[in-house]
Amino acid sequence: DGTPSSGGHPRGTDLDRDRFFGEPDYNYDTTNRNTYSVMLDHDFGNGLTFNANARYSKSDTGFGYAYIYDALGANDPTGMVDRNYFGSDKSSEQFIVDAHLLYETNFNDVESRTLLGVEYNKFESKNDSFYTAAPAINWQNPVYSGGPGSLSPFNSVANDQKAKAVYLQQDLTFFDKLTASIGLRNDWLDLRETDRRTGTSASGDFSEFTKRFGLSYKLTEELAAYVSYAESVAPPSAGTEPTLGTQYEAGIKYRPDAFPALFTASIYDLTMENITTYEAPTYLPATVDKIRHRGIDLEAKAEVTANINLIASYSYIDSKIVENRTEGTRLNSRH
C-alpha cells in the first residue's frame, strides 16, 4: 500500500513539501500480487542438459488521487486552483513457460555451445480508468472536501495476448581467443484489445523473425573487446502492434590478474518502435512511434578486501523521439 502523489503544485510558487493539495480520503496506491514458479533441470551427460521454467502470476492494482489542473497558477488572486480526480483499477494474469536443450562440446581447439528452446507466454488484463472534475482548492489555505464517491470508468480496456517462440543460439570459441555468437528466433504473436464500454475489438496476428550476432576477442589474458547486433520483438503494453527493437553495441572488458575485479566500458545505439508511455499526471497510455537511444555505460566491480566489495557505474543516455508528433523531444527517463 502506498500513496501515488502529493496532488501537484501551483505553477509559479515555491515548492513546499509539507503542503498537500490532493484529497486525504482519495489518495491510495495498492498492489496485490501472487506468483508461483516451477523450475526443472536434467543432465543427460556427455554435455547435454535440459532446463524448463514456468511461472504463473496474478495481480490486482489500483490507484486514485486528486491533482491540480492549474490553468492560471499563482496568478489567480483568489488563490483557488482547479483539480481533477484520477483513478485506475487493473487486474492481470500471466502464464509463461520456457524450455530449452543445451549441448556443450569441444572440437580440437574449438569450444561449442548450442542452445535450442521454445517459449509460451499468455497474458490477460482488464483496466478501468476514472477521470472527473474535483472541487477547486485554495493553495494558500487548503481545505479538503473528501473523495469523489462512486465513479464510472471513462476508459475500460481488456487485453488478451498469446505469444509463442522458438529460438536457436550457437556460440563458438576458437583457441580460447575469439568467441562468435549467432542467435535466431521467431515469435508468433496473437494480440487482441477490446474496448469494454463499446464492445469493439482490434486484433493482430504477427510472425516476427529476429536475429543477433556477437564477436568477442581476447586482446590479452586480461583485456577483451566485443561488438554485437541484436533485434527484439515483444507484445505491446497497449494496442495491437508489437514493440520492435534494434541495437548496436561495442565495448571492452578488463579483468586484472593482480586483484579480483572487472571493468567494462560500452557504447550503444538502440532504436525502438511502437513504445507505450504513461505521462504524468493522468498516466494514460500513449504510443510513441519511434525512439532512439545513444549512450555510454561504464562499470567497475572490485573486491577491495575479503569483506568489502565495490560497485561503481556511470551511464549517459541521449534519448530522442524520432517519429511522432513530439519528434525531437526527449523520452521520459523513467521509461
Image: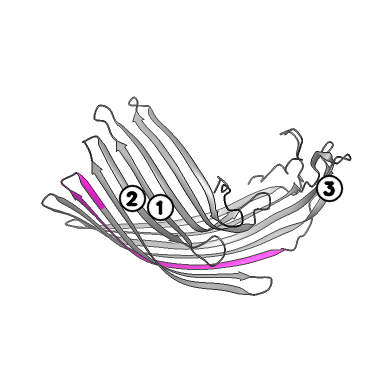
**Labelled disc at residue 247:** 1
Badge 2 element:
strand
Q: Residue furthest top?
A: 305
Image point 68% across, 53% down: which residue?
282
**Labelled disc at residue 136:** 3
Is residue 43 toward the left or the right of residue 269 in the image?
left
Q: CA distance from mark 1 to mark 2?
A: 8 Å
Q: Is residue 193 above or below residue 48?
A: below
Could you tell which of marks 2 and 3 lies nearer the N-terminus?
A: 3
Q: Is residue 288 above or below residue 124?
A: above
Badge 3 element:
strand
Give residue 94's position: percent from left, percent from top: 50, 62
Q: Is residue 207 visible?
A: yes
Could you tell which of marks 3 and 1 lies nearer the N-terminus?
A: 3
Q: Residue flagged by tag 1: what amino acid is it?
A: Gln
**Which of these two is toward me, 58 or 317?**
317
Residue density around tag 2, few if under 14, some if 14–19, many if 20 or more, within 10 Å: some
Q: Which residues are magenta?
A: 151-180
Q: CA distance from mark 3 to mark 1?
A: 48 Å
Residue tagged 2:
228
